[in-house]
Amino acid sequence: MTENTQRATARTWIGLAVLVLPMLLIAIDGMVLVFALPAITTDLQPSGTEQLWILDIYSLMLAGLLITMSSLGDRIGRRRLLLIGAVGFAAASVLGALASAPWMLILARALLGVAGATIMPSTLSIIRNMFLDRNQRRTAMAVWAAMGSAGAAAGPIVGGWIIEAFSWHAAFLMNIPVMIILLALAPIFVPESANPMPGRIDVPSIALSLTGMVTLVYGVKTLAEGEQPLAALVTFVSGAVLLVLFVVRQLRIPNPMINVRLFRVRSFTGAVVVDLLSVFALVGALFALTQHLQLIAGLSTVQAALWMLPQAAVSAIAGFLAAALVKRIPASILVSAGGVITAAGFGMLLFLTPQTPPFVIAISLCLVGLGAGVGLTLTNDIIMSSVRPEHAGQAAAVSETAYEVGTALGTAVLGSILLGFYRTGLASHAPIGLPGTVLSAAEETLAAALAFTAELPGALGQALADAAVTSFTQALAWTGGLAALILTGVAIFAAIMLRGVSAQADLVKADH
């Protein structure tokens, strides 16, 4: 069964340009704060715990509220929710810029997470309703994904320039002009859409989805830190149990927030899992390779970001390439090929040495970006095409939740594996005569190890630096090899689960 394939007009494409503005901003915003944290720490002097909350509260609120906000958009109108979110994002940005104490900044970041949860799924579900023609929608999805890649790559450059030229306060103020443009143009170019028969709001479902997602993601982040493994494991399991209860409730109530029966459709489930694992690998790669460029290659933040720009360009081009090729080549083959290409990018890390020049890292990242760009464009299209336009909020919630969980797992799991390999290598390569307290501190991070080298006697300090750099490089190589194996499995999984997906017909049968 297919829906009316009304073609998009020039007005529709202008509407898309308006919609991707906040996506670009949110992607930049997420990277800017990482580089602003040293200046914030000097100014506000937050404790270690407060620093963690400043960084983490945004993603926790975002992940926890995606399902709820998507359901709310289905009920009150997605454009209306988008505009409410834009006002909230601007207001929270002002609060962040004016923060004079850590608690104020934590509150601002939390409110930004709430507002972000209204914006991200709203844009995706509105695109589903604006572009009814499958081919045009695929191109629109490529544009949407390209903005995310561009924002993530531009974040360090924009952040570094703003912080150097102005202050960390300006990193929040840059959000306001974009939100004003969105508020001015969206009512003109972006059509309203909603579910005509949404049903009542189910408060227990909201509570289960919010607490479940926040607890799960927090558990993942705490596990990655490794300081309280038992408490982190209990938190993670508690979140998983709450989400299972949420699923059980969705199966029992007449108007669920998310139609979990969609996961009975092979292609939908396959697309969601491929989405999650692709983001998992991509985020893990960026996290690890950024450290290599800065700490081992000795590049500045902006220089490292410039070497990562080609990856963003390749990822964006890959989305448009996928949208064109899928008209002739089955989606299962293209997504599977994307997984193989991404795996090849990670496989290059097996040959990494401390002397590896930055351009080799850039090539590896370009392969990862090419494969992920193809895969994410097509899987997002499959997910959004699996429901009727009036139920687009549900599909958008699933897609964005997969992205957020993949991001959390990519940083936590691959980061933990990298750290484990690094610690094992450093323990075996550490120079004789190194004090035990120094070794314990050096095992925490490569940055900590390199900081100690200046305090130790010449030969011992150089020996520690060599051991730390060698251990980290070997750890990165092993982590890259493991990620390559995972992505190879993703490629096989995609070939099986996405087999038979049509390039033209929407999968609205999944909505029943």
Image (cartoon, rainbow, N blue to C red):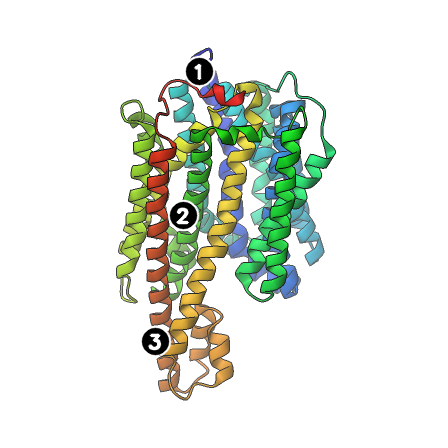
Q: Is 166 left or right of 381, judged from the image as shown? A: right
Residue 43 appears in which quarter of the rendering? bottom right
**Sequence-wise, which precedes: disc 1 or disc 2?**
1
Identify which residue is drawn at 32% across, 56% down: 481
For the residue pair 21 and 240, the one nearer the viewer reads as: 240
Q: Is 40 left or right of 332, judged from the image as shown? A: right
Q: Disc 3 designates what residue? A: 466
User: Is residue 368 among the parts visible in the rendering?
Assistant: no
Residue 455 vertical position relative to residue 237 in the rendered view, above or below: below
- Count residues near mark 2 (Cα–Cα under 10 Å), then give few for <14, some for 14-19, many for 20+: many
Q: Disc 2 designates what residue? A: 282
Screen quadrant of the N terminus:
top left
Q: CA distance from mark 2 to mark 3?
A: 28 Å
Q: Nearer the viewer, mark 1 or mark 2?
A: 2
**Sequence-wise, which precedes: disc 2 or disc 3?**
2
Q: Are marks 1 and 2 in contact (CB under 8 Å)?
A: no
Q: Secondary structure at mark 3?
A: helix
Q: Disc 1 designates what residue? A: 8
Identify which residue is drawn at 47% across, 29% down: 383
Amino acid carrying label 3: it is Asp
Point out residue 333 in the picture as x, y percentages from the top left corner: 30, 32
Residue 222 vertical position relative to residue 175 in the rendered view, above or below: below
Identify which residue is drawn at 30% across, 27% down: 330
Point out residue 469 in the picture as x, y percentages from the top left corner: 36, 71
Identify which residue is drawn at 31% across, 48% down: 343
